[in-house]
Image (cartoon, coloured by chain):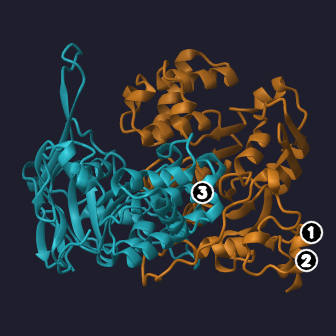
Chain colours: A orange, B cyan
Amino acid sequence: MILSVRDLRVSFRTNEGLVRAIDGVSFDLEESEILGVVGESGSGKTVSLLAVMGLITDPNAVIDGSIRYKGRELVGLPPRELRRLRGNEIAMIFQDPMTALTPVYTIGWQIAEQIRAHRGVSKAKAMQRVEQLLAEVNFPNPHEAMSRYPHQLSGGMRQRAVIAMALSCDPALLVADEPTTALDVTVQAGILDLVRKLRATHKSAVVFITHDMGVVSELADRVMVMYAGRVVERGTRTELFSDPRHPYTRALLGSIPPLTGDKPRRLPAIPGSPPSLLRLPQGCAFGPRCPVRYEPCEADKPSLGSGAHAAACFREAQA
Amino acid sequence: MSEPMTDTDRPILETRSLAKRFSIGSRFSAEGRRTVHAVDNVSLTVRRGETVGLVGESGCGKSTLARCLVRLHDITDGKLLFEGDDITSKSLSELRPLRRRLQMVFQDPSASLNPRRRVGDLVAEPLRIHGKLPSAEIKKRVAGLFELVGLLPDHVMRYPHELSGGQRQRVGIARAIALNPDLVVLDEPVSALDVSVQAQIVNLLADLQEKLKLTYIFIAHDLSVVRQISTRIAVMYLGSIVEEGPAEEVFAAPAHPYSQALISAVPVVETTPGGTRKRIILAGDVPSPLKPPSGCRFHPRCPIAAERCRSERPELKEYRPGRKVACHFPTLT
């Protein structure tokens, strides 16, 4: 077991009251497994992974629950200890590679810095490793690319450089937060291919955050669907896509226009919009938009249950 | 405005070898002044009542083309005709009466709506400028527009930040249709929205088109959304159209190698395990429009490029009624 998160809660104190961004998220991750986390903006998918990385530094954040990395508790770990893990055993790829790279140093320098910080090797050795890494993420001319600055690269190349940096210390856990959202589909296809390949060669476990059901279905072994700070459904990729159990998952899959076959005259849309975390309904957060809601949904929040394929829905529990 | 009924085949908008070039850099920089060929030799015909979807990767010139079509950019070369009338170089005052018939919806409604004005005012603005209506009449029209786009009457007094992303885009749409336009250019109208809200807006646009007899030019990078809403598709690469045809045909059997790669790259939900589609992964990146490649602009990345592609640029040719492709070796079915 690489990662085991239990009952994670993250709240932020704001002027308008306590905002519960994450409300009881639990999941496990095995070696070289890809977990897809799907959700819309505000669903808590990014915050939950920032918590895992120990990157929530807001003094108004309250983090509860347990995050165990290889059996070691990360919640409450001193920053020094966390820094030793981050970038080394746990690496992260962010959505926008331009903000993840510093504009004033070359790509080669930036990747080498990370290797030297964690491995204590000579600069020449580190540079050698950088060249290897850049070749591995399909830079056509890795030696030359090392002396390039981020602005001299295209978006896809920048994201590859960030991936090379993330892989530089052979992380056991790789967290990717919408790494392809800012990219074109043709570039995205290449990056997804790369992630699949690297999982095989580096044996890293990957948490892949995205809002795109298509991306998840092509990449993930297991999937976790989030809505308003809670996990509403989890299961293997096949289970989730061939037998979606939560009404939100079903509605989300149904509202994607097909790429082949007949066009529906109208798309089956989900009414309303995702709720504000400040004004969550008392019962199920998806209740107000749900086509199959009934009385129990208004009083209580349904729990996810313990099954491998589970949905947090009263209708599901009833069935 | 009352106008003679025209048959549906008559183009409402037409471009002839339209080009837009930007000059960048300074005479004193190392490279000197250079020219970006953003849109190059585009001839596109839009007929009344149809939806033309423009697709392509970022930097392919689709947004620049859209802005040229409503004359938000000046056109460098070629012609732009609105109902057969040459509007390529009309002055701003000459364009003003046309503006009401040619509208645009932008990608990010929080950027295109003035944050300090109530959304009711924002929708009333075009009516005040063009309509010369009494204020009671304007109020009534605004209420009607709000209903039409699915906003509640009491939303009129809200500010943009008090609305959700989907509601803000509905305001943007209400503004665009306030003056009963003929043609609406939609530049990524659903890309900034949450997935669960996108379908609502796509449905709304389809309903409005039917009710108001609108013609759309629809730009989006999400190909499945474009397919859903468009009757015709134009695929752009590096400033030019490389393929054009009825939406479902182009998606089912793309003729240009670039369209094939683009469509194959879209990740789709596979409900049957193991049923993965064949994917074409393109080598390299989109070349810079500062130095477009010789011959066919796609040849450096094309899996089937031959000698001829390096030297001779293929023209956009109609190989079957309604289907056009710019390739020396198209996949014709």
The residue nearer to you, when weighing B75 against A307, is B75
Occupied quadrant, residue A227: bottom right
| Amino acid type, callout 2 | Pro
Q: Amino acid at mark 1?
A: Asp
| Residue at the disc numbered 3 | B156
Real-space CA distance between mark 2 and mark 3, rounded to the nearest whole angstrom: 35 Å
Residue at image mark 2? A296
Q: Position of residue B153 (x, y in %)?
A: 62, 64
- Helix, strand, or loop for circle 1? loop
Calculate the distance from the C-alpha at mark 1 to the C-alpha at mark 2.
Answer: 6 Å
Picture layout, residue A14 above or below residue B164? above
Q: CA distance from mark 1 to mark 3?
A: 34 Å
Q: Does residue A79 appear in the picture of this structure?
A: yes
Helix or strand or loop: what does disc 3 sit on?
Answer: helix
| Image quadrant assignment for residue B13 | bottom left
Crowding at dot 2, Cα within 10 Å, few <14 / some 14-19 / many 20+, comes out as some
Tag 3: residue type?
Val
Q: Is residue B232 left or right of residue A208?
A: left
Q: Is residue A162 left or right of residue B303?
A: right
For disc 1, the marked residue is A300
